[in-house]
Every structure is written in structure tokens, then in C-alpha cells.
Image (tube, helix red, strand yellow):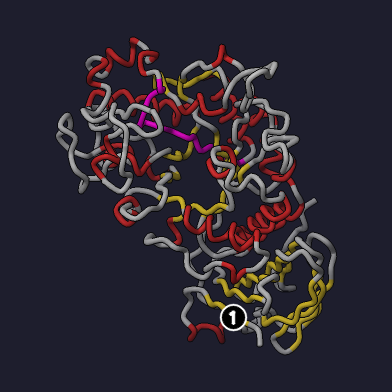
Amino acid sequence: MKHSIQSLLAVSTLSTLLASCGGDKKAPEAVTNDDVILHAWSWSFDTIAANMKNIADAGFDYVQTSPANTCYVGEGGGMALYSQPGDSVTGKWYYYYQPIDWKIGNYLLGDRDQFKAMCDSAAKYGVKVIVDVLPNHTAVDHTAVTADLDSAVGGHDKLFHANGLNDIIDYNDRYQCTTGKMGGLPDVNTENPDFQYYYMKYVNDLIACGARGFRYDTAKHIGLPSDPLDSLAERNNFWDIATGREPIRDITLSMPDSLFIYGEVLQDKNVKEDEYAEYMSLTASAYGHALRNALVNHNYYADSLASWHHKADPTKLVTWVESHDTYANQHESAGISDELIREGYVFLTARQNGVPLFFSRPAGSTRDNYWGNNRVGARGNDEFMNPEVVAVNKFRHAMHGQPESIFVSDNGAVIEVARGNKGVALINIGEEQASIDLPTTLKDGEYVDKVHDTTFKVKDGKISGVLTPLTSYIIYSVCLLYTSPS
């Protein structure tokens, strides 16, 4: 007996999904997320601009940059992703996560003119730019912040929360979490109106240059209206200002209705996911962990993938197999093969909801050498252009309005994501060849997938065929017009 895990779609509509698309009554459209994000981690602005056609051709709607703010110059300005003692080139990728001012441009990624040129290139190819922003903290060496920043916020002592130089001891204590020093990074008083005014000028300048979205780093460390107040704050109103709900003096967030904003709200025991979700989309960090567990065990059933593990509606989730943090910090995901990461991404992207993010690993990286060619600014490896990645990105766009059904083989190695009766993605996360006979929503007939030209047969509501290990297949119904990726 095969297993079936249905989506949120009511069972009563299944008969409509199974109907032929040639002249039958059209099924009502389901609410779907259609966009996909390429995280061009540590690529320079010039490198992103030079690769914009590749990004667009690969089917990505957004490209996410690393932080654009003025940052601490570490290790003499070395450009290594991560240097070890004795390396000929020094540097660390994370210095751009240590702001010393909120103006566009840093030594790692490029200046304001280069940022604008990248955004102009994105607009030319129909790609939108998401910028990683981090108002929550400064550089570890907070004496390095610029005189302009100190002056703008009313003096250096006004830049931080009263608790801002004290380490967080209990991350589930909301006062500590939203006002204390995280990982040695002093906590900015994001409730200081002078800081808010200065920060929003930076955000609106990014938008004026062409940015069309933001990822808020360490978002769960910025207080919500219901959180305890720092003694130097009158209101926890940062998110109302940052998302355009209210102005700060004469400044309001530019074009709020045209922006995609999401927050890195890593899940834990006392995180107010539902309240954060009132302001923006959120990272589905727990789901990423569950998916990686299933992948490394080559078994869908090794963890719970039927639930999103999140309080927010799935339409408001940003999903990933891995993030730059899971790869570069504790290397939680860095040992997983490129092939498994790719199959996990195909699974996420074929689904009805969530906005999938594809993390670009360093060029030349291996499972023994996570840093690869070890240079900030360089393009990542070629995985973002892999034919399976390209095919599933385009499949996602073509499946607009189509509800999902998920079917899984008994041993958990093969996953079928069916979208209405318009198409399916078949994903073998196993290490062995697999012969399948799974339920499907496709009409009876013979189908050839768009990536590997492999033939599958559908008869009496079952799809059969043979899948290569660690491989995915994208199939469209004959009644859906589709152009195969070149």
C-alpha cells in the first residue's frame, strides 16, 4: 500500500482535480506562492550584475545580496571567505554583518554606484533585488562606528539599548533576546527615533537605487509591540516604521506595496512567530531542519514533512534546504552533497506554498573543503543553473493556482509532488535506482519528463517508471503549454 499526504485542499475538491483539462469545467484556483529566490551569498554587486542573464534564464524571480551597508574592515581588508592562520589571503565573510554605518557600500561587495548598476541589470532582465539588512547591531568593535552615525543618533551612548552591551544569557527571555548583545554584537536601540530616521534614509536609498525587497537579519532580536521595553525606549515601534505602517518624522518606507520583506526569525520555544508574521514573511527554519534530516536519511518519513512546523500561514514562509548560516557557521548542512541539496530544493519548489530560497555554495567547494576557492566577491558554483533547478523553477511558475498533493513510496525514497492535474515532480532522494507505481493526479497516458527525457506511464490513477538515484523529473500534462528550458 502506498501512502498519500494531501495538502490543505479540502477532500471534496479532489474530483475536480482529477478531471480532464480538455473541455471539462475549470477547477477553482488555489492560493499559491510562485516566486523563487537565489541567494547570491558573498557575490559582489559586479558579479551579480554580470550573471543576471544566467539568473533570469534559470527562472529565479529574486536575487538576494549579502549586506550592502558600510561595515567593519577586518583583517586588513582581506577578501577570503574564511581564512585560517598562515593563509596567504586573510579575511572573513561575516564582516559585512558588522555595520559601522548605514550607508550603501562596503569594501567586500562594492560601492553605491556598483549597487545601482546591479539593480539596473536586474530590472533589464526582470529580476528583483532583495537586500540583506541588519539594523539590530553594530560591529563587535563598536568604537569603529562612524562619527556621522554617532552624531545622527544623538551621541554614541544613544546608539545602543541600556542593556545593549550585556550578553544574552537566555535566548528565550524576550527582554534579553530583544535588547542584549548577541554573539558579541552590541545591540542597537532600534526604538531611538533618531536611529529610525537615519536607518530609514538608508532603506529608501536602497529602494531608490532599485532594491525591491529586504531580508531582516536577526529579526527576532528586534522587539515587537508586546515585548518588554528597554529603559531607553518609549515604544517598540520599529517594525511599524520599517514596514511602512507609520512614518518617522517626514520619512515613510518607499513603495511598501511593491516590496517583498521577510525576517530571519529563527524558531525556538518563546518566539512570537504569529506576531512577527503580522508584519512580514518569516523563515521556516524548523522545516529546513526537518527536511535535511529526511534527506540525509534518504527517507521522507525520517522526519515530519507533512507539517510546516510553523505558526504562520505557509503562504508567509520563506523555505530553504540550507541557509548561509547552516552552511557557513556551524556547518550544519555543509556536509550534505550538492545532489541531495538539489533534490530537497526541487521538493520545496514544486510545492504549492512557501517561497523557496536556493543558497549559492562557494565555487570549487566540496564536502571536504567547504570554502572552495575561498574568495568574497566571486560567483558561487554552477548548481543554481543545474537543469533540474531550472526545470523546477519554471514548473513552479507554470503551476500557478494549482493545489498540491504529495505521494510517497513505502520506503520514503521517492516523493511525488502533484499540482492539480497539470503536472508532477518526481524526486528520488534514495541512493538506489527506484521503480515506482504511485498514485497520481495525472490523466492516463504516457509522459516524457522535461529534464532527462525519461518516459513514465499513467494508468488507472497510478504512475509507473524507473528513477535514477538522487535525481528529479518534471512532468507536465499534455494540456499545459510548456517550453522546455534550453
Image coords of residue 82 (percent x, y): 61, 27
> Is 3 drawn above or below residue 485 in the view shown?
below
The residue at the point 55 percent across, 15 percent down is: 75
The residue at the point 66 percent across, 28 percent down is: 47
> Is 186 drawn above or below residue 14 in the view shown?
above
> Is 373 drawn above or below residue 170 in the view shown?
above
Image coords of residue 251 (percent x, y): 28, 29
Q: Nearer the viewer, residue 20 or 339?
A: 339
Q: Nearer the viewer, residue 443 or 407?
A: 407
Q: Is residue 45 visible?
A: yes
What amino acid is labelled 1 in the image?
A: Ser
For residue 342, side relative to residue 466 (left or right)? left
Q: Quadrant of the N terminus?
A: bottom right
Image coords of residue 434 (percent x, y): 79, 72
The residue at the point 45 percent across, 60 percent down is: 315
Image quadrant where residue 107 sits: top right
> Count of labels shown?
1
> Is 253 drawn above or below residue 195 in the view shown?
below
Asked if residue 110 is among those painted magenta in the image, a careful observer would answer no
For residue 255, side relative to residue 424 (left or right)? left
Image coords of residue 149 (percent x, y): 33, 16
Image quadrant where residue 368 sits: top right
Please tell me whether mark 1 sits on a helix, a strand or a loop.
strand
Asked if residue 133 is among those painted magenta in the image, a careful observer would answer yes
Q: List the residue tagged with mark 1.
A: 4
Q: Nearer the viewer, residue 297 or 376?
A: 297
Magenta segment, prevailing SS (helix, strand or loop): loop
| Disc 1 residue crowd, few under 14, some 14–19, many 20+, Cα 10 Å | some
Q: Which residues are magenta?
A: 126-140
For residue 137, side relative to residue 409 (left or right)? left
The residue at the point 46 percent across, 21 percent down is: 104
